[in-house]
Structure formats: C-alpha cells, structure tokens
Amino acid sequence: MAASLFDHYQRRKSELEKQLAAYDAKSDVISSRRGILALIAAVGIVFGLLRGLPTWGWGLIAAVGVAFGALVVRHAFVASDRALVEERLKVVAAGLRRIQGEAEPEDPFKPKLQDPHGARFASGEHPNSGDLDLFGPSSLFVMVSRAETAVGEETLASWLKEPAAVDVVRARQEAAKELLADPVLLEDLAVLSRRAESRGRAEEPLAVWGEAPAVMPVAGASGPELPLRRILVMLGRLSVPLTIGLYFGSSYLAVHSKWLGYAYAVPLVLQLFILGALYGPIARMVTFVSSREAPFGRFRLVFERIESCQMQSPLLKRIVDALRGEGAPASAELAKLEKVIGFADLRHNGLIHFAANLFLLYDVWVALALERWRQRSGKKARRWLSALGELEALASIAIYAGEQERLAWPDVDDGPARISAEELGHPLLPAGSCVRNDLELPEPGRALLVTGSNMSGKSTYLRSMGLCAVMALAGLPVCARRASVSRMETWTSMRIQDALDRGMSHFYAELVRLKAIVDAAHKGKKVLFLLDEILHGTNSHERSIGARGVVLDLVARGAVGAVSTHDFALVAIAEESGGHVRTVHFSDRIEEEKMVFDYKLREGVVETTNAIRLMKAVGIDVAFADQA
C-alpha cells in the first residue's frame, strides 16, 4: 500500500521545493526594491531638508513612500503564501519519513504539546488499552493518528477503545479508501487543521462557549437575569443617541444656559450605570472570545475546504452535509463570527476602547452581536467539530493504510466469536523485524495454549491477536495478508499492576481482571481473551487448578482466545478441553553458544527452556544446581 503514497510524496516534495525556491527569489527581489526605494526616499528627504525641494520634488518622495508601502504589503502576501507552502512541505516530508522509518526531528520553535501521545485516553479499567499499547509513547495511537485537532484525536481514540458495529466498520473502510484515493485532500486537511492549533486541548473552547447559557437578552435567549438586562439594554438604546446629540449640541444649549451645556452628563451617568451593571457578563464573554486561547475563526478555512468536496461514500457525504447545513454553511457562520470578534478586539486599544465604551456602550453592542450568533449557531458548533473530528480520524486511517507495508482490510461480520489471519504481525514492530505467523480460531469455544521459552515471542503473538481485533473493529487495516474477525470484545490480562493506595497486591489485581473477563463471558458477550502467564503469582498447584477453571469456563461460554505460559502443568488444559484448546509454541536454539530466536509459531508443546541460560547470559554469577 505504501508505494502509491510514497510516489505522491516524492512528487509533491519536488513541486513544493520548487515553489519555495520561487517564493524565496520573489522575496529577495521585493526586499531589494524596498531597499532601493528606502534609500531614494532617505536621500531625497535629507536633500530636501538641507537644500530645499520644490513641491513636485516632495510629491515624488511621497510617491516613493507609497510605492514602498505597496511593496511592504506585497511582501507580506508573499511571506504568507510561502509559509503555506512550507507547511505543506513539512506535512509531505513527515509522510516520507514515516514510510522510510525515520524519526521525526525535534523542532525547537514548535510549541510543546501537553499530551502528544494520547496518554490521556488510556485507562487502567479499560479491557485492553494498557496491555495492547493503544495509547502513550510508541503506541498504536501515535502510529495511526494524523489528527491535528483535539476533536480528531478524541474521535480516533474512541474508535480504538470501543468495537464498532459491523455496518459502521464497513462504512469507515469505504470512506478511508475514498480518502486514500485523494492525497491532495489529505494534504489540505493536514495543513489547514494544523493551523487551527487545537491539538492537546481538553475540550474545544468554541463548543463550550457555543453551548453556554445566554448572558445577553436577544431573541431566543432565556434566563433568570435576562429580563433586567433587557431593560438596561433598552435604556442604553435611548441614552446613546441622546448623549451624542446633547454633547454635539452643548455649545448651542450653553447659549441659553450654562448648565444646559452639560446636559449630556445626565444620560452619560446612566450609561456608566448600565456598563457597571452589565460589566461582569459582558467582560467575561468579550474577553474570552477575543483571547489568544480561543480564536474561534481558526476552523473556517478547513471547514470551507471540506464543504467544497464532492464525496461518494455515505459516511463522507454525511460529514460534508453536517458542515454545509440547511442554512448558511459552517465556514460562512464562522466568517460572520470572525467579523464580530474583530470588533471585540478593540478592547486591546485602551484609550479608544474606553471612549467608545463611555459614549457608545461599545461592549454592550458587541456582546449582543456575539449572543445573537451564539443563539443562532452556537449549538451547531459541536456538530461541526464532531464532523471535523470524524473526518480527521478517517484521514488518519487512510494515511496509515497508504504509508504502511503489507496491510489488509479485514472482513468483519456479526456472527459467533471467531478470528483468523494469514501472516499476522505486530503493527508496532518495524517491517524488517516483524515475523509473521498464522492465526486460526474459526469458531466459538476455541483457544490456543501458547508455550515457549523466555523472549521467544509469546506475549508479542498475543498482542498481535488483540491488535488485529481492535484495529479491525475500529475500521483500520490490520497487519496481515488476510484477516477475518467477528464483532466481539477484546479482554486482556497481561501487564498487571498492583495498587498500594487501594491495598491491592499484584495477584489480587490479576484476580479482579480475570473476574471481569469471566463476567463478560457469563453475560453472553462475545469475548476474545488474551491471558499472559495466567496466575503466575501463586504456587504451581493452585495455579494449575485456577487456570484450568478459568480457561475451560471461557471456552465453554463460547469465548475465543489464547493463554501463554511457561508452566508445563497447564498443558493439561488442552488435554481436558476435548480438542477445543490447541497447544502451540515458540522456541529458541543454540548457534555458536548463542541463543537464536526465529519467532515462528509451531504446533505442540515447547521442548526446551532457557531461563538458566538467560541468567548466565546477563551475568548473574552464582552457583546453579547440576540438574539446572
């Protein structure tokens, strides 16, 4: 799959580098011309001041100044266009690095994200996220996510954490394939979404503000404090023209009476009262929307790009329709909001803002305009952002499918629990070191008992199984030549951690997890279970009894899965299962006094062990009993 995107990235990289060079050349020419004009103007001014110039001479200097200003504006446009091309080049170069397996270089000028690895989405209570490395450094989320907004990251994370319905999985696959066929759109989404500067936010301020209770009395707004504020606004509408009229007519009124010349002070005092009464809600609203943390208009360009798309798959059509809306599209509504926020930015000009507020009640009218927008479109904002998040998640899947080698779109169904795959690998391993094995659990009540020496690949194989199911039911392609999965819950017990603050030992924590897995099967849920070194925190006798009970119960309930172990006593589980549990193994061999692992899955029980050899290999210099 990687070849098509690799070729596209190579071609785009060449095109963008040429565009960047052209903009640099254009910028150099403009800079030179600005320098010449500045020198001419400076010489002319000095000469004029020392020797004097006729009127037409000063006119020429003024014309030079106008030309200089025009070049400054032109230079700004060139710089803006160059920055966009540079951003595109970064996106394309990052794609090439991912395909070639190169690390992303550190950018000292790029703001550090609070959570670039999605660790906030991990949960110890989740059935599998910790054991399968769904989130955190070197995780599936890091490998797949190309989302540049908080909502995109949240959407993708929710898909990884919860198996989707079969029709939803198929719709996501269809949509991702359509996006993969349009790499220019994927590039546009990445660049325009990146400019939104939204990654790492707990929640998008636009959605929070859009759903907040009304603070100003406009049509459609309700609230216990609004009737009084409506009266204050009505008084403001009367007092502002009265204040202005009396102020500009003060000289005429003063002819009749000195005191009448100050008549404008009466409505002005009323306006001060109105400002004081409304200051709290107005200040909070206007300050928030005009702050750097909430530049609401930053999504306008990416919304505009999505609205222009003509999609074929039903899921993508629904996303585009959510942004186009029944009335004005999302981008047009945000453009209107940007205009109002532009007026709100007057707050940053202290003296002018003070005068406008005093004589015109400026903030009141800005707050009313913001409230009207919020009542009209505020509650749509979350739907818009949700659509963007869904599209970014689909784009992430498409890019992952296009950049990774040897992936397959799995078949998914809603039948009984089962999972099978040919040449199944672990998606987080580099392609060069990923050894692939087949997997076949074709019907409910089937399991694998995986034995093997240390470091031979047992846990990796179990994680490959789990990731295959999770990815397939999220709508992603899987690391296999072919795969087929039924919709089921994936439960794991692999990296058990104690919890001293709750008085929970390692062994007890494992029992709690095993109970959750057994309970899920008892409730009639379709379950894929993956148990690594089950009950290794107790003695061999009780471990054997407990493990047999758990595994045979899960199999009897129709679950499918795998159990890894070093304990040969647990092989009895396969013998007692009536053929429902199959033994397989990984092993090592000695070559030139070194242990060699091929990570290939074989039938039967492992015949070798390597714990003592490993102890010696790492330098544990103690006496070992002869039988070891």
Image (spheres, grey):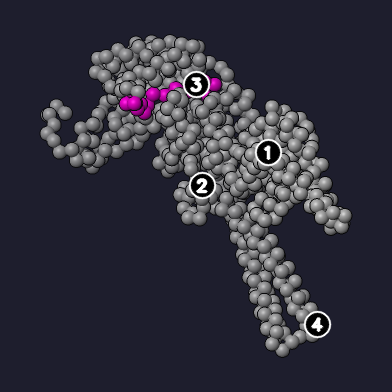
Q: Are marks 1 and 3 in contact (CB under 8 Å)?
A: no
Q: Give the quarter of the figure containing the C terminus.
A: top left
**Amino acid type at mark 3:** Glu
> Disc 4 marks which residue?
55
Residue at image position (33%, 16%) is 547
Query: Alpha carbon of mark 2 to alpha carbon of mark 3: how far?
Result: 31 Å
Q: Quadrant of residue 278?
A: top right
Q: Position of residue 198 (x, y in %)?
A: 58, 43
Q: Earlier in the sequence, mark 1 or mark 3?
A: 1
What label sits on residue 99 in the rendered view?
2
Helix, strand or loop at label 1? It is helix
> Disc 3 marks which residue?
489
- Whether residue 483 is in magenta: the answer is yes
Residue at image position (80%, 43%) is 239
Query: Alpha carbon of mark 1 to alpha carbon of mark 2: how far?
Result: 60 Å
- Say if 447 sits above or below 463 in the image: above
Position of residue 110 in the picture relative to residue 191 (left or right): left
What segment is highlighted magenta in the picture? 482-501
Q: Earlier in the sequence, mark 3 or mark 4?
A: 4
Residue at image position (49%, 24%) is 420
